Image (spheres, rainbow, N blue to C red):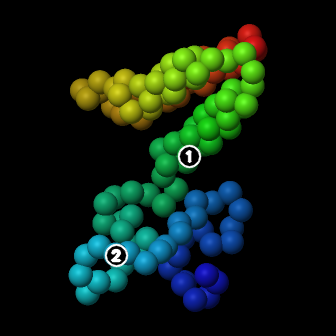
């Protein structure tokens, strides 16, 4: 979609900027149309959301690292399952709901990436 056709789209054509892909929504009544910027504003999410950026960078690192492991010989399926389980635990479960989320997320990301980095140097 060209940027002149959708002037309120966020990040079109600018390097190193978050870009949102809008597709046809099949939920709701379609009576109200909303831009991505309006939706983000409604829920108090900044366009340059620090967590969104860190999450996507982390997921990219984890996926590329795990793909390398899955393609290597010498790593058993059981070990891969344990790594995926540790990733899941770090990203989704290991949080104290009485504490601020983002600092815990940063600690969890540092731990799991550090663990994968150590494993890569061992293999």
Residue 15 visible to an observer of this rendering: yes
Task: Give how far across and how far down residue 100 sits, in percent.
Answer: 33, 31
Figure quadrant of residue 40? bottom left
Residue that appears at 48% across and 44% down: 51
Return the residue nearer the eye: 48 or 123.
123
> Nearer the viewer's eye, disc 2 or disc 1?
2
Percent x, y of residue 15: 71, 62
> Circle 2 is placed at which residue position?
26
Residue 77: x %, y % from top left: 58, 21
Q: Which element type, helix, strand or loop, lies under badge 2? A: loop
Image quarter of the N terminus: bottom right
Q: Residues within 10 Å of mark 2 (few under 14, many from 20)?
A: few
- Secondary structure category for the residue under label 1: helix
Residue at screen point 41% across, 25% down:
89
Q: Earlier in the sequence, mark 2 or mark 1?
A: 2
Q: Which residue is mark 1?
A: 56
Q: Name the foreground residue: 26 vs 49.
A: 26
Quarter location, residue 32: bottom left
Quick check: 7 above or below 56?
A: below
Residue 1 as seen in the image, left or right of residue 28: right
Q: Disc number at residue 104?
A: none
Cα distance between the residues tagged 2 and 1: 25 Å
Q: Examine the image and state in which quarter residue 41 appears.
A: bottom left
Would you place residue 64 above or below residue 11 in this image? above
Measured along the vertical axis of the image, is residue 122 above or below residue 100?
Answer: above
Quadrant where the C terminus lies?
top right
Check disc 1: other Cα within 10 Å, few if <14, some if 14-19, many if 20+: few
């Amino acid at each position: 979609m060209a940027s002149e056709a959708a002037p309120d789209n966020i990040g079109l054509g600018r390097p190193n900027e978050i870009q949102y892909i809008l597709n046809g929504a099949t939920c709701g009544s379609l009576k109200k149309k909303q831009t991505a910027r309006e939706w983000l504003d409604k829920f108090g999410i900044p366009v340059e959301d620090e967590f969104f950026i860190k999450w996507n960078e982390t997921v990219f690192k984890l996926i590329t690292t795990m793909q390398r492991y899955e393609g290597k010989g010498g790593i058993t399926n059981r070990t891969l399952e344990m790594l995926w389980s540790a990733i899941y635990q770090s990203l989704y479960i290991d949080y104290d709901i009485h504490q601020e989320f983002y600092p815990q997320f940063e600690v969890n990301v540092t731990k799991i990436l550090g663990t994968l980095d150590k494993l890569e140097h061992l293999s």
